[in-house]
Amino acid sequence: MDKIRIIGGVPLEGTIRISGAKNAALPLMCAALLTEKPFTLTNVPYLADIVTMTKLLMQHGVEMSMTDAHARQTMGGITLGRTLVLDASNIFNKTAPYEIVRKMRASVLVLGPLLARFGEARVSLPGGCAIGTRPIDLHLKALEQMGADIELDQGYIVAKAPKGLHGAEIYFNMVSVGATENIVMAATLAQGTTVLRNAACEPEIVDLVQCLRGMGANIHGEGTPTLTIHGVPTLGSVFHHVMADRIEAGSFLACVALAGGDVTLTHAPVDAMLPVLEKAREAGVVLHTPNHQTLRITSQGKLEPVDIITQPHPAFPTDMQAQFMAMMLLTSGTSTITETIFENRFMHVPELMRMGANIQLKDRLAIVKGVPKLNGAEVMATDLRASISLAIAALATPEETVIHRIYHLDRGYENLEAKLSACGADIVRMK
Ligand code: EPZ
């Protein structure tokens, strides 16, 4: 299994180009199932999860092609281009198999599109993952309200809507990004109007809605808790640019904040990062945003403690919790981090403590007491964002750190070593 060796203690200097957002690209790729016309995405990131989604869609019958011959990268046996053309005119399989779904929960986002366009879908229940049980009850309840028959058969959701889906008034009793995305996509082809209340407002949902609108969908309210979708008979072709990754950008911000240095992020979604930028400034990081896509980060590595509560957008994102915890390890005081979204998203804590961090856990609260320094260690990645928090900590100590199981990292960070090495980091991948 690949591992990464980091020797830190050196300020980072340079420029990093932010890639397309994993959490926008994955639902966008599923939206291709809604139309038989060519569906083109640009600014697609080179990530293991994109490869997994490509394999999932291809086994449904989606044909993939790339138009930018120069910018290609082969991962997991699939050659990815920045620009993907997806053709879902010949879908011959409506089943999303367990062996793919269990590896990537976002696979359940094919459920809404398949049901809406074909009236049937058979999708494996995803099962739990490292950060929580992550059920999909909200997705299923909403689809039933839209007229779907949902049954569970040997771990698979068997969904049928032979007369098609119809609009409904749906209230989500908790905010769910995936449920909002699945139902928005399903509602685009439903008969009548669907109103979603307590919907998620994440920027990636705004990006998805803009793409769906480009296909001819009739949707209003994206970015607010109330979405109104008027169903249309069919959807057409679209050429959509995937929004930049606010979590990748926030992760690099945390690297520079703790290691120190002066780094400029280009093609960054500054306006989608406001809660993270606010907290970073509170911690003493100096940030300049000369325009909406450029973020210059300057830090001496000495940060002030802050208190963080993760909540749905536009509050502080749970996907940045582990990274900010790493940022707080060397402050002069005590920080508190409350994780309200997932029940088990502190898997990085024991690993950070092996590097000398002082963290106390009380249920969903982490109390981080700053220490004078961190030591290098052999540590293990447990989930995507936990793995980057280990790299952030490793960059702040001159001792050697080796991070094992970095397939977690490869799911959500494109060419991490190259981007950090270009800013002076000593980071190498080892077999
Ligand atoms: C999306 O996951 C993201 N993944 C996650 O990013 C992110 O952490 C999460 O949203 C929250 O922002 C993608 O976009 C591919 P949810 P999702 O449905 O949709 C509970 C990363 O690191 N819930 O908003 O699965 C659920 O258990 C990943 O990039 C139900 O109870 O998250 C969780 O506690 C990790 N029933 C909470 O809601 C449901 O039917 C939020 O989950 C659905 C969700």
Image: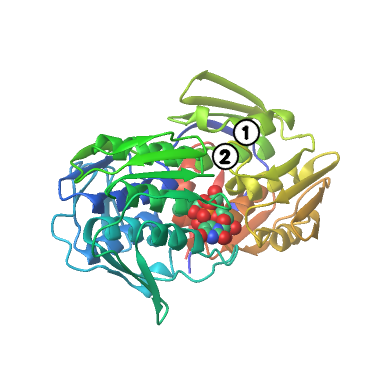
Query: Quadrant of residue 351 in the image?
Result: bottom right
Is label 1 within 8 A of ligand 1 (CB to nearest ligand atom)? no
The secondary element bearing badge 1 is classed as helix
Q: Nearer the viewer, residue 21 or 164?
A: 164
Residue 119, image x, y percentages: 25, 62
User: In the displayed structure, would residue 367 be above or below residue 204?
Assistant: below
Q: Please report contact status of discs 1 and 2: CB closer than 8 Å, yes or no.
A: yes
Of callouts 1 and 2, the N-terminal one = 1
At x 63%, y 51%, the residue is 389
Task: Give the label, 1 or 2, closer to the camera.
Answer: 2
Q: Please state the horizontal and vertical placement of residue 299, each as a whole percent of the image.
A: 68, 29
Residue 64: assigned label = none
The amino acid beneath tag 1 is Pro
Query: Residue reaching furthest bottom?
Result: 154
133 left or right of 20 in image: right
Q: Mark 1 points at which residue?
A: 275
- Determine the residue positioned at 64% across, 45% down: 311
Say if disc 2 is inside 8 Å of ligand 1: yes
Would residue 157 be visible to someone looking at this image?
yes
Q: Which residue lies furthest to the top in this view?
A: 290
Q: Residue furthest right?
A: 333
The amino acid marked with disc number 2 is His
Q: Residue tagged by mark 2?
A: 313
* Number of marks in picture: 2
Q: How crowded is mark 1: few (under 14 residues within 10 Å), some or many (20 or more)?
A: some
Which residue is rendered at x = 47% and y = 22% of the image?
A: 292
The one of 109 and 378 positioned closer to us in this rendering: 109
Residue that appears at 47% across and 31% down: 269
Say if residue 387 shows up in the picture.
Answer: no
Residue 323 in picture, x, y percent from top left:
63, 46
